[in-house]
Image: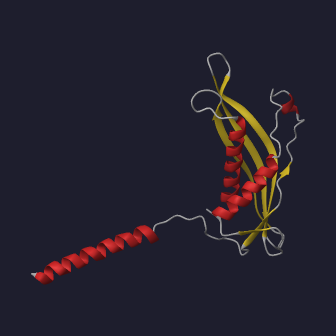
Amino acid sequence: MLNLITFTTTTKNWRILLVLLLMVGGCGYSTRGFKYKEDSIRIKPVVNKINITSEDRKYSGYTAYPRLIEDRLTNRLVSEFNIQSNLDVVSESRNALELECQLTEYRRQTLRYTDSDDPEEQRLRLKVKMKLVNSAGEVLQKDNIVGQATFFLTGPNRKSEVAAQNDLIEDTARRITEAVVEAW
């Protein structure tokens, strides 16, 4: 009888240990898979190619433009690649991937109006042309990425446009990083 109790207790302990091991070490999702032979990336400063004198901007009623958004996006890209990938971010290297980004459009759209026709909710969109080049100069990936952020101007969830721009930059950098790191 004592052997049966010991055997049951030992089996129970092994089952608990097995479940704990599976929870800690298995069944996880990671974006740290690697599809390039290079182990580092050089992120070139983002270039601003937004045409603020274009015809559609002339009549849009919105002429404000966020200052230094390209520098803020470059800094956020470096942070995202350091956090989300196994690529080392370097300033100069012959054996590194090279990421080039160009801002092509920045828009603010009103999504919802109050009863008195004042804007209540708005969306910011940032379009970026992205190009990834390997160390041999071959283009590995070319893509158009659109980041966006919505914000309320009134009510308990209101947010300033500057705070929404920070969310926009974060979303755009995350999408660019995912496009480079994840291969589906």
**Residue sitting farthest toward the bottom:** 3
Q: Please report the residue visible at 30 percent of the width from the left and 77 percent of the height from the top.
A: 14
68 vs 62: above or below: below
Residue 148 x %, y %: 68, 43
66 vs 14: above or below: above
67 or 104: nearer the viewer: 67
Is residue 180 among what the camera can see?
Answer: no
| Position of the C terminus by quadrant | bottom right
**Residue sitting farthest toward the right:** 53
| Position of the N terminus by quadrant | bottom left
Residue 117 x %, y %: 67, 18
State which quadrant residue 57 falls in: top right
Is residue 151 among what the camera can see?
Answer: yes
State which quadrant residue 106 falls in: top right
Q: How is the image coloured?
A: secondary structure
Q: Please report the residue visible at 80 percent of the width from the left and 75 percent of the height from the top.
A: 95
Judged left or right of residue 96, residue 53 is right
State which quadrant residue 10 falls in: bottom left
Residue 68 x %, y %: 83, 46
